Amino acid sequence: MFTGDGLIIGEDRDTESKTASFFCVDGSTGRTLWSGKDFGEAWWIGLLGVKDGTLYLHGFKKPDMPEHKHIFAVDVRTGQLRWKNSDCAFLAVAENDVFGFKDLFERRVFYRIDGRTGTLLEELTALPDSVDPNERYERTDFRFPSPVPKEAIPAPVAPHITDAVAAEYVAGERYTVLNTHRRNTPPAEGLTNRVMVIGNDGHRVLFTDTLNSATPYPVPDSFFMDGDRLYYIKERTTLTAVRLKP
């Protein structure tokens, strides 16, 4: 999850031990601001969004059920828990207030909560008109790859997709970023997923890296672009950023 002021929030999940923790890094340098935070919930917790310096997370009404309950409000710069509400689910943020809700028998009740302290301010029968329950509290203006077309293959990628099981790309003004999946030898070892940056002038490979050395099937959207920065996760464990300069 990317904030509007250049931070990256991530979650690190261990499916075997059923533990989850969260971290925050500076998107321009990769410097870790904080990490290893679970906010008192070992597994049933997830990211909601970031607004005005506060990171919001949710819990779940019941294990193995998708319905949210609980609101965790965290200082995004320090990773310190500011407050927690265990009674309702997150809905929206407006100015200094957080709005939550609770589903009762045949009706939904809304709550206005002080965003600084977590204090319940009032119970409402409806949301104020100024509150948008569909607002997104994270950046979404990234470029994701498209499948390489079987016909009219872009010239920069054509020499680099021979024997590829799947290929997708993002075309830039000076370069093209290509993601391929190729069969390993022996085939039982799955596919190798690699990303490469190809110069549009001469089609030279300027950068390449292995995202996954043994994956059982092609994974779409293995990378994405944020301006001139390429992001991907290497071998399912390492968040990696590459600055693409002219």
Image (cartoon, rainbow, N blue to C red):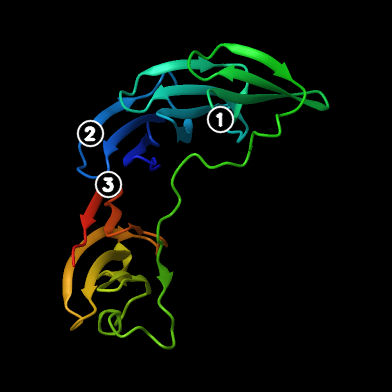
Q: Disc 2 designates what residue?
A: 32
Is tag 3's residue or tag 2's residue first in the polypeptide sequence?
2
Contact flag, marks 1 and 2 (Cβ < 8 Å): no
Residue most extreme to the bottom? 152
Q: Is the C terminus in the top left, top right, bottom left or bottom right quadrant?
A: bottom left
Residue 112 picture quarter: top right
SS assignment at label 1: strand
Side of 138 where 197 appears, left or right: left
Q: CA–CA distance between discs 1 and 2?
A: 27 Å
Looking at this view, is 174 or 198 the one in front? Answer: 174
Q: Disc 1 designates what residue?
A: 93
* Residue at image location 53% in from the left, 14% down from the top: 118
Residue 225 picture quarter: bottom left
Looking at this view, is 157 or 219 the one in front? Answer: 157
* Residue at image location 66% in from the left, 34% down from the top: 130
Looking at this view, is 150 or 243 the one in front? Answer: 243
* Residue at image location 26% in from the left, 65% down from the top: 194
Q: Disc 3 designates what residue?
A: 239
Q: Mark 2 packing: few (<14 Cα in 10 Å), some, or many (20+)?
A: few
SS assignment at label 2: strand
Q: Nearer the viewer, mark 3 or mark 2?
A: 2
Residue 33 picture quarter: top left
In the picture shown, does residue 157 fall above or below 220? Answer: below
Q: Nearer the viewer, mark 1 or mark 3?
A: 1
Is tag 1's residue or tag 3's residue first in the polypeptide sequence?
1
Side of 82 where 210 appears, left or right: left
One can see residue 44 in this view: no
- Hey, what amino acid is under mark 3? Leu
Side of 109 where 118 appears, left or right: left
Q: Mark 3 packing: few (<14 Cα in 10 Å), some, or many (20+)?
A: few
